[in-house]
Image (spheres, grey):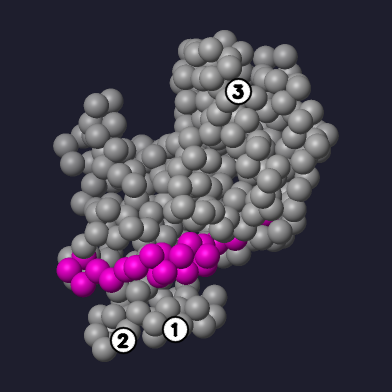
Amino acid sequence: MKLSLFIIGIALIIALIVIVAGIRQHAGKRDADYLLDYLKHNGNWSLTVVRNGETLVSVREDEMYPLASAMKIIIAIEYAKRCGEQTLDPSRSISLEELDRYYIPDTDGGAHKAWIAYSKDKGLLLGNSTTLENVVKGMMAFSSNANTDYLIDLLGMGAINESLDELHIEKHEALYPVTGAMLIPTYLKMKDPSYTDDYIETKIKEMSKEEYIQIAQTIAQRLKEGEKGLYIENGHSSKRLDKIWSDRLTRSTTFEYSTLMGKLNSKNFFDKETQDRLDSVMEGLMESPINQEWLKHAGQKGGSTEFLVTNAAYATDKEGNSTEVALFTNELGAGESEKISGSLNSFMLNILRDEDFRNELKEL
């Protein structure tokens, strides 16, 4: 089975700070200007930029947008909280076979395979197992959907969604299994092979949020119980079905996510034990010596489908300047997701380092 739908992490603003910082300024500026120009001439986006506690940009920041993989930040926070409470051990051994139950080939832009390859290269695998913390890093840095659905099951979907209240997030839809939702068309087709694409599309569109999530959970449970091969064998997808899936991804606002980035950036919202775990899984950027030269700390998580790109990031530089950014886009045309994803690194770097660029953003 080959599905065209996918979620990929805009993994690692490390490219923005490590690669772009190491090349000529005009090249990075050109990439940033592509995205800036796109924002100037289109209205299918939301942006919030906060600098040193002052909101510099606030455009459609209360409108709900599908989050794609940016929602994985909430899962990472719940993981870190459990570790802080000592109800989870980050060194706990997790079998790759447990994760593989949730992995459907050709649905995640190569994220899961890339994480496994990286883990092997870095010596993070012990036989066929790895640590729980590395599983979380695979979700955050590589955006593995298999790891995501494993963690949703481990932590409990109810507990993850309850954490939204603890984080004081008001406008945020419920999280649910990612791969489970991807496979809803396959689930319906297996239920009755006579269902046409038109019928399946209509049925999914008309599902209440509760029914949609319930089916996604049912599928995730069946994957856990070993039915992966059945779903691969009967895989059913189309571009129109992919669009419905993308449209129904968990939604929130750039205001909520810029505020959440502020909590992560402040280092004083969470207790020390929780914050330490969060830093470990959120701040892979700081493994770079180049970043360490000018940043105290920085983290981010983004995602994309063929139809949207999202990103939420925070950073504090060594001069004490704090920055939080949330950018969500949707309803992108052919090729625009790839172009915007490719421009994000330079765009974010310029927000952090270029006052003239920040002033241009204020004019949006």
Q: Residues within 10 Å of mark 2 (few under 14, many from 20)?
A: some
Q: Nearer the viewer, residue 351 or 80?
A: 351
Q: Which residue is mark 3?
A: 29
Residue at 70% over, 42% down = 40
- Judging by the rendered image, the residue that carries numbered circle 2 is 195
Task: Classify mark 1: helix, strand or loop.
Answer: helix
Q: Are marks 3 and 2 in contact (CB under 8 Å)?
A: no
Is residue 276 in view from this perspective? Answer: no
Q: Is residue 268 magenta?
A: no
Give the residue type that dot 3 points to. Answer: Lys
Q: Does the segment drawn in magenta span residue 241?
A: yes
Q: Residue at x 65, y 37 (%)?
A: 37
Name which residue lies at 28% across and 64% down: 224
Residue occupied by mark 1? 203
Whichever of callouts 1 and 2 sits on the residue coming sooner in the sequence is: 2
Residue 352 place in picture, x, y as percent: 67, 24
